[in-house]
Image (tube, rainbow, N blue to C red):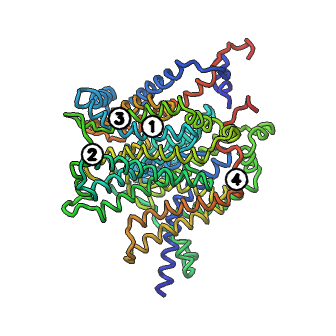
Amino acid sequence: MYLSDKLNLGKSIKLEKRLSVPPVLYLIVPVVSVILVLLLGGLFLAVLGYNPIEVYEILLNGAFGNTYNFTETIVHAIPLMLTGLGVSLAFKMGLWNIGAEGQLYFGAFMASGVALFFHDLPTPLMLTLVLIAGFLGGALWGFVPAALKVFLGVNETLTTLLLNYVAILWVDYFIFGPWKDPKGFLPYSKVFPQSAMLPVFPGTRIHAGLVLAILAAIILWIIIWKTTWGYEIRLIGENTQVARAAGINIARNMLLVMIISGGLAGLAGMGEVCGIIGRLQHNISPGYGYTAIIIAWLSRLNPLVILLVAVIFGGLNNGGYALQMVGLPESTVTMLQGAILLFVLGGDILTQYRVKIHRRGCGA
Amino acid sequence: MEMVTLLTATLHAAIISATPILYAALGEIFAERSGVLNLGVEGIMLVGAATGFYTVVNSQSLLLGVLATVAVSLLFGLIFSFITITLRASQVVTGLVLTIFGTGLSAFLGKSMIGQASPVIFHKIPVPVLSKIPILGHVLFNHDMLVYVLYLLVPLSWFFIYRTREGLNLRAVGENPAAADALGINVFAVRYFYVCLGSIFAGLAGAYLSLAYAPSWLENMSGGRGWIAIVLVIFATWNPVRAALGALIFGGVDVLGFKFQARGIGISPYFMRMLPYLITIIVLIIITARSQMAKNLMPKALTIPYDREER
């Protein structure tokens, strides 16, 4: 089923492999994808009896309409940045870390443990410890599938994914059980001491996680593009056999990358509990770890682009809450986000192939 | 006597628990046999569950519910096929995104149905005579239609894959698409067909959840069963009969968790609910450790898009 067989409109259309990719295509494909998704989504909404223009207006306004909404968009972008950066590093090496959601939960769990049990510590020490605990929690949750992959060859896509469910149930066990606030009716832990709360930008809920995310993006960019280690990571991602022949220690790199990848997601979880909520509870993430996969892929694994795309997606998440005014669920946004990447994935063929249109009879 | 009753009830429940996983796994076996790894199963299951439930609530007709599920999951199969087979995008990423998209779409469709009960569901229909057999009668022949259909699908799928010409073509496309193409098999058509078939099976797995297993709609009600099905396919070395046995083991573990809880054994329900995922991981570790077998039996062209010009 050749494209040229299917699109016989008096002309024949042929795909030719490109030798080099015009950089502008990397911009055109996502932009056209977003427009197509908005059009199709609009049609879908119209069929269901909603006014698509009104819906998009609410979404846009809810995301970027005024200073308050914009700061809230950044608040939602922080975990997306950290998890997006985390998974992108693993993807860069060809490791399918689909476990950012679980790594986020386990990071939140470890940070909460420190905040709840060492509540008398002075602020600087406490903050350092929750930070380390958050990173370690995520790193541990990334290390387990990495070790299984390295030592036993177990497929990491499936183990990272299955561990997401385990981490969420693990947190549930603690907030419904041993860590449940004895005075509360709902399943959540006691409130953290003030010393465990990340500093915020005055007048907003934007917490220090933003600084962590920006730092992480810059460091990752430097590592990937300016260091020998980054070269090794890229080489393993592009061609494992060549990397092995070049004497690169693949096992060590995989373990390290998954520790950092998971650690960043763990920091995202720490940011949610120590930056915003102030205690451990159910549903600390509306699927940030999954949205991260979309963001990383849309950004073509470029750490700096991830920051930007995370803000746009954070805006969609934030604007999604406003959609409830017109009776639309937040999941509307998940659909839009998924659909955009589906279009980009499909459209990517244009970055690899040139479409040649011949009139009938002129060869081809 | 009490032991016998308990055993009968456990085995009976294990079959019910195995059914959605096995539907999804059978579908995935067909898709993977053709060389396409569809990680969208979990999402398609959810969309199937939401569509089936939505249609039945609004039409009061089980038949329409099943037809709507088939139609929508077929559409998902076509979308996945077009992106991965025709446009040759990464099967792994496309599947993951399809799952995310499907999770969102099902939550969107299901929002208004939370807490509603289905007016009609798949009731248990005891098979005359057979269901009267002591123990086995209740275990095997006191189920709903979708389970009985599965009883037929397992041997039929096995026969189709290993004993028919079409099955041979299917395996050829998954093992060596270029050679199959040279023999005049349309690789693209074969892959489209089996990915869509697999997608329909995944949708039916979802419909089983929302119309028979727990007749209602809950966000994320498939709870990872699509992923368990994908592991089950590897466990079964792409063989439908082994998949059925594997599904029964998974189903049994699931049920034992419930039974232990009901008997007040002092393990937290949250740990019991982790069991299916942990056991799936352990199974994955064991089959990988004996990996030579899994590797040899895996369709050679799995996850590789076919490009005629690179033959």
Kindly identify which residue carries mark 1. Answer: A85
How far apart in space, not on screen, are marks 3 and 4 (Cα)?
41 Å
Report which quarter residue A15 is drawn in: top right
What chain letter is assigned to the residue under label 2?
Answer: A
Of pointers 3 and 1, the one earlier in the residue sequence: 1
On whether disc 3 and disc 2 are found on a single subunit, the reply is yes
Residue A166: give its label.
none
Closer to the camera, A282 or B145?
A: A282
Residue A314: give its label.
3
The number of numbered discs placed on residues in the rendered structure image is 4
Q: Residue furthest bottom?
A: B1
Residue A305: percent from left, percent from top = 44, 28
Residue A60: percent from left, percent from top = 31, 28
Mark 2 residue type: Pro
Give the number of the mark in front: 3 or 1.
1
Give the number of the mark in front: 1 or 4.
1
Classify mark 2: residues with Cα within 10 Å, few (<14), some (14-19) or many (20+). Answer: few
- Position of A359 with respect to B105 (left or right) is right
For the question of whether residue A251 can be seen, the reply is yes
- SS under mark 4: helix
What chain letter is assigned to the residue under label 3?
Answer: A
Kindly identify which residue carries mark 2. Answer: A124
Give the number of the mark in front: 4 or 2.
2
Mark 1 residue type: Leu
Residue B131: percent from left, percent from top = 55, 76
- Which residue is found at the position 56% from the left and 50% from the top? A156
Residue B295: give its label.
4
Residues under numbered marks 3 and 2 in contact, where contact means CB atoms less than 8 Å apart: no
